[in-house]
Amino acid sequence: MIRDFFYAWERRLVSVDTNRIVRPFEWGLDWLEVEADPDETAGSRVARFADEAVADPDWFTAAPCEDYTVEGDTLRFPSAVTTPHPENNTVRLRYFPAEYKNGSRRATLVLPQWNSDPEAHVGLCHLLARVGISALRLSLPYHDDRMPPELERADYIVSPNIGRTLHANRQAVLDARRAIAWLAAQGYNSIGILGTSLGSCLAMLTAAHEPLIKAAALNHISPFFADVVWEGISTTHVRAGLDGAIELDELRRCWLPISPQPYIDRMQNTPSLLIYTRYDLSFPVRLSRQLVQEFTAREIPHTVVVMPCGHYTIGKTPFKWLDGYTLVQFLRRHL
């Protein structure tokens, strides 16, 4: 009965958004800067690109940035990659400094969920600052004032365009690493990262490649990007664009560079909080448990918390308070 109650609640919350668009399938080779090969299909070329990206230790490495601008509580800097959308090429973050006291200066980079509005996680940032951890909230690519005028939703970061999805999520990780570099330059010597849903995936990718990160709080988890898109109720419109053009095994291989799975071993030195919800229809529970099993098998330091709600209902009272408390307490202990 409890399960059915939460499943019905989750579906009602998903149905609130009526502006989801089914976009056409595209391989998106133009987003990957790959040379055409007459002996390869577009699909095999993207798959080979993905294999090479996973094997490349510098794929998530950006050139240092010197052009940071702070105005009030807003930090801006140029993204490490350039897109055809000028709005998306400037990274915008909100800064919530904590009162400095003797001892370690602590900060956390906060990555909200897909299609978050500009106020998402702001309350959490204030809470972090209140307990002595400065917070820096990053607007993901194609979100907030980074959204091109033709969009109502942040469709370009997760879509049936395979290459663009790879490009946009890599961009998010490079943006996050530049933000971490700025925090370090401000004198923060104990830096964490916190992400929710899509932001959780990006937070783990960042933590796996950024040695300055001391702890990672991951809110909703899965080892594979493709499987969440394929199965989750939040992405049924994306799945509709994929159907008939690609199978899950091929999609998983193409999107493996932006999946946590190939980088799990790189989390050995980063204590991680793994949160999933018991009645999640967006990040299927078996996928969340699979990532937990991977951390356990590799003896990677981690804490697991299972929330008694679903993906969307975690944002409702009282679950949002329980979630926020869990995230903040973990970061207080590990930073």
Image: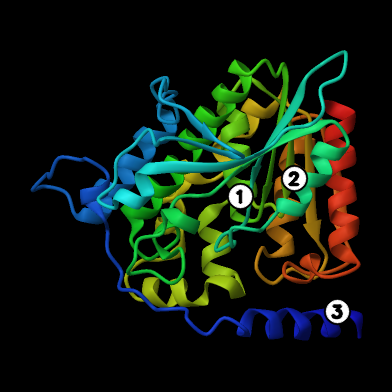
The quarter of the image holding the C terminus is top right
Compute the Cα span from label 3 to label 2.
31 Å
The kind of residue on which mark 2 rests is: Cys
Compute the Cα span from label 2 to label 1.
15 Å
**67 or 238, which lies in front?**
67
In the figure, 170 relative to 121: above or below? above
Relative placement, left or right, of 6 versus 110 is right
Task: Assign a secondary structure to mark 1.
Answer: helix
Mark 3 Cα-neighbour bin, 10 Å: few <14, some 14–19, many ≥20: some
Which badge, 3 or 2, is on the more N-terminal residue?
3
Q: Report the coloring of the rendering.
A: rainbow
Which badge, 2 or 1, is on the more N-terminal residue?
2
Q: Where does label 1 land, which residue?
A: 199
What is the x, y in percent for residue 127?
Answer: 83, 45
Q: Is residue 323 visible?
A: yes
Task: Assign a secondary structure to mark 3.
Answer: helix
Dot in front, 2 or 1? 2
Relative placement, left or right, of 22 versus 118 is left
In the figure, 219 relative to 7: above or below? above
Relative placement, left or right, of 328 versus 229 is right
Q: Quadrant of residue 23?
A: bottom left
The residue that appears at 88% across and 13% down in the rendered structure is 102
The residue that appears at 43% across and 25% down in the rendered structure is 61
Compute the Cα span from label 3 to label 1.
26 Å
Q: Where does label 3 land, which residue?
A: 3
Which badge, 3 or 1, is on the more N-terminal residue?
3
Q: Where does label 2 land, which residue?
A: 125
The quarter of the image holding the N terminus is bottom right
The residue sitting at the front extreme is 72
Q: Is residue 223 visible?
A: no
Mark 1 Cα-neighbour bin, 10 Å: few <14, some 14–19, many ≥20: many
**125 or 6, which lies in front?**
125
